[in-house]
Image: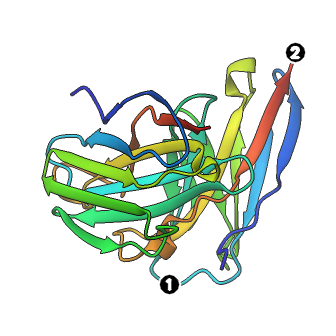
Amino acid sequence: DAGVIQSPRHEVTEMGQEVTLRCKPISGHDYLFWYRQTMMRGLELLIYFNNNVPIDDSGMPEDRFSAKMPNASFSTLKIQPSEPRDSAVYFCASSSVPGLAGASYNEQFFGPGTRLTVL
Amino acid sequence: LAKTTQPISMDSYEGQEVNITCSHNNIATNDYITWYQQFPSQGPRFIIQGYKTKVTNEVASLFIPADRKSSTLSLPRVSLSDTAVYYCLVGDRVQTGANNLFFGTGTRLTVIP
C-alpha cells in the first residue's frame, strides 16, 4: 500500500484566496483525521470522519474551514478565504478499528503533510 | 483540557538510554497509553502502546506503574537518528471522541554526537 497520500505537498497562496487540500487514506481504513501543526500550538486535531461521516469537528477553528469526505478514498479540507494565520503544516491520517482489518491498536497512519503558506 | 503532561525538550548523548516520562493523572479505566514519534518534515508514526506494566518492541519499551498515572518511554542506546519529537497520548483503544487524540507539542529529543 502506498500509505496516506496528500496533495499538494506545498501550497503558497495570497490572503483571501481559496485553498483546497486533498487526502487519500489507506484502503480499508474506517477513520480519517485532519490535523494542523504549528510551532506554537503543536499538532491539533481539526476534524475526523468515521465511514465517511464527520464525527467531531470541534477543532475546526472557524467557519472559513470546511472538510468533506465524499467517499471512502478521498477527503478535502478547504479554507475560504485564507488568512496568514492559517499558515501551517496540515496532516491527514487514517486508521482502522482495533481487531478489524488485522489491526491490533488504534494506530494512526499519517501522510507526508501539506505545508501551507498564506502571504 | 490537556490530558497529558510531558517535558518540552530533552538532550542526550549518543549511546545513552533515554527515558521520557508522561503524566496522565486523570487516566480512565478504559484508556490506553500510546506514543508517537515525529521526524522533521514527516508525519508522526506509532511507536508503542500499552495498558499496564511493561511493553517492549523492537523500537522502545514502555513502563507503566500500577496506578497508571504516568508512563515512561525508554529508548535504548539512542543514535543521532532518534532525534525527533515524541508524543504521549491517552485514550480509548477505539476512537470515541476528539479528547482521545490530543497530541499537543510533545517532547523534542535532541541526540548529541
According to the picture, the residue beneath numbered tag 1 turns out to be B29
Residue drawn at 50 percent across, 75 percent down: B99
- Kind of element beneath mark 1: loop
Residue B105's label in the rendered image is none
Q: Nearer the viewer, residue A114 or A28?
A: A114
Question: Farthest residue in the top direction?
Answer: B113
**Residue A2 image position (x, y, % from top left):** 25, 26
Residue, far left: A71
Q: Amino acid at mark 1?
A: Thr
Q: Between residues B61 and B86, which one lies in front from this camera angle?
A: B86
Q: Is residue B25 left or right of residue A48?
A: right
x and y, in percent, of residue A115 in the image: 53, 34
Dot 1 falls on which chain?
B
Work out whether mark 2 precedes mark 1 in sequence or the reverse, and give the earlier one: 1
The residue beneath circle 2 is B113
Q: Amino acid at mark 2?
A: Pro
> Which residue is depicted at the point 87% across and 32% down?
B12
User: What kind of element bears circle 2?
Assistant: loop
